[in-house]
């Protein structure tokens, strides 16, 4: 018994000594770079307090988390820290820190430690779940699909927009355009990714697969929700039941696998060089069905909701600013939309400024997290004035708050909460001051496609409707999953031209 007690004491002492040496080594690094601690936002029992509130109160607080976060940055400065389920999280809207994490020192920060475990059962290893060599291979495989020759022709997209416009009431009655926009981009994204549409707005355009479009879309949305919750729970994700999630994942897998098998069977058929789907391009690089499925699903995550959210937000803002809608109609009145290509859309200055202003106010990805893969140093945020470096030990989560970043009056001028596309006549944000499409090596591959598709959709709407009026006096509220859409939808009345 005495021997066991002695051995236990020795083990405990060795553990304490190891921890003390580790702490001294990290403290030495912090001192070497002159690091100081950023302000701390107390979050004691925040999770418990949130769940003690009523369901409605929780929803209000969750949907207001973005402006609340921006308010905390105004209180503490561009960088502050708080304790979360993941340990210490550094939240920053400092361009210098964002550049360090997403650009200059991007290899020192990753996503795999907090994404892969929760998302692997659904979408495996790929662009959105890994770091290093696997991520590099995934990006290289997907990148050819976004070459300008593959996205410039808007003819197929035009058909989906036409079906979308046909679904809009022409009698001035109230319609929530957010779900309609989502259905349209569900069709266009699956056509771009798989070569076949879900047929959500046009049943004659469906893939005739083993799962109908509505069932697939429901399973898709529930799968994204489960991935988001599992990622949010972090080390507690094991407490979440898998049974319901697995059922939804399998529905998504069945449709994707069906299209992979069909594409493999059609390999000998010629595909137009400028109209290849992502799946067509992937088949030129691998025949591994699991890898193909993972790449397709992660491509769908990146492609489907992003443009739909951008278009819905832009319509939401335009419905409350009729003078801007009138100017947009004047800008696009004489355009023959049938002849437009993706390269033409940036020529319309007001249109471009409307989309940029929408992305400034309501970024599709309002914040993005990274975890330090090694002991790292952020350029600023420490000390009483926030101008000293901050030590980010390995395992520290750093959250780039782009919602707050886009509200910097030094960059964007006064009245940053107002929708004012004309501000883009004079403001010139740097690459780390406007993060609508991310930055650095993980910047969005589909940026040009997203802007072209969003522009074309708004052009057709402006040509078809002389008026757009808001039918909801509630403010925008961020419903965050992988993207952030308006929790209240986009309730408007459209007045035909």
Image: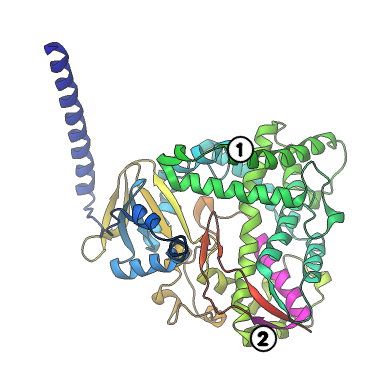
Give the residue at mark 1.
Answer: 246
The foreground one among 88 and 248 is 248
Check the image and report above or below for 233 versus 389. Answer: above
- The colour scheme used to paint the residues is rainbow
Residue 229 x/y as whole percent: 50, 48
Graded by Cα atoms within 10 Å as few (under 14), some (14 to 19) or many (20 or more), the crowding at tag 1 reads some
Element carrying mark 1: helix
In the image, taking residue 245 as reference, residue 156 lies left or right, namely right
Labelled disc at residue 327: 2
Q: Residue at x 69, y 51 (%)?
A: 217
Image quadrant assignment for residue 488: bottom right
Quarter of the image for the N terminus: give it: top left
Q: CA distance from mark 1 to mark 2?
A: 49 Å
Q: Which badge, 1 or 2, is on the more N-terminal residue?
A: 1
Q: Residue at x 81, y 68 (%)?
A: 162
Residue 195 x/y as whole percent: 79, 48
């Amino acid at each position: 018994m005495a021997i066991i007690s002695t051995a236990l004491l020795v083990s405990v002492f060795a553990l304490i000594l190891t921890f003390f040496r580790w702490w001294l080594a990290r403290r030495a690094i912090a001192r070497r770079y002159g690091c100081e601690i950023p302000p701390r936002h107390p979050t004691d029992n925040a999770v418990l307090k949130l769940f003690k509130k009523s369901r409605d109160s929780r929803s209000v607080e969750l949907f207001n988390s973005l402006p609340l976060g921006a308010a905390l940055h105004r209180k503490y400065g561009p960088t502050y820290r708080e304790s979360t389920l993941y340990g210490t999280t550094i939240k920053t809207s400092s361009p210098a820190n964002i550049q360090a994490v997403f650009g200059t020192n991007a290899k020192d920060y990753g996503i795999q430690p907090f994404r892969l475990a929760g998302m692997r059962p659904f979408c495996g290893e790929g662009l959105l779940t890994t770091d290093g060599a696997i991520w590099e291979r995934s990006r290289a495989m997907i990148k050819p699909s976004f070459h300008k020759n593959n996205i410039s022709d808007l003819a197929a997209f035009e058909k989906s927009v036409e079906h979308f416009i046909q679904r809009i009431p022409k009698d001035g009655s109230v319609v929530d355009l957010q779900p309609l926009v989502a259905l349209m981009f569900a069709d266009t994204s699956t056509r771009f990714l798989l070569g076949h549409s879900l047929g959500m707005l046009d049943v004659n355009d469906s893939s005739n697969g083993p799962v109908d479009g509505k069932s697939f879309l429901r399973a898709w949305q529930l799968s994204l929700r489960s991935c988001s919750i599992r990622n949010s729970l972090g080390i507690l994700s094991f407490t979440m039941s898998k049974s319901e999630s697995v059922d939804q994942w399998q529905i998504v897998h069945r449709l994707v696998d069906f299209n992979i098998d069909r594409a493999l069977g059609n390999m000998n058929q010629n595909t137009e060089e400028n109209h290849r789907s992502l799946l067509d391009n992937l088949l030129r690089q691998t025949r591994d069905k699991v890898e193909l499925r993972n790449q397709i699903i992660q491509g769908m995550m990146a492609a489907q909701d992003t443009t739909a959210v951008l278009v819905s937000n832009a319509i939401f803002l335009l419905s409350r600013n009729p003078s801007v809608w009138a100017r947009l109609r004047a800008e696009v009145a004489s355009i023959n939309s049938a002849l437009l290509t993706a390269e033409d859309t940036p020529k319309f200055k007001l249109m471009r400024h409307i989309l940029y202003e929408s992305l400034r106010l309501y970024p599709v990805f309002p914040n993005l997290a990274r975890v330090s893969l090694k002991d790292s140093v952020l350029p600023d945020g420490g000390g009483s004035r926030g101008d000293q470096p901050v030590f980010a030990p390995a395992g520290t989560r750093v959250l780039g708050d782009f919602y707050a970043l886009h509200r910097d009056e030094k960059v964007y001028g006064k009245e940053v909460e107002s929708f004012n596309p004309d501000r883009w006549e004079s403001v010139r944000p740097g690459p780390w001051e406007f993060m609508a499409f991310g930055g650095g090596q993980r910047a969005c591959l589909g940026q040009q496609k997203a802007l072209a598709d969003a522009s074309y959709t708004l052009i057709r709407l402006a040509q078809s409707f002389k008026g757009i009026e808001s039918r909801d006096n509630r403010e925008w509220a961020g419903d965050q999953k992988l993207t952030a859409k308006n929790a209240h939808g986009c309730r408007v009345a459209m007045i035909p031209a």
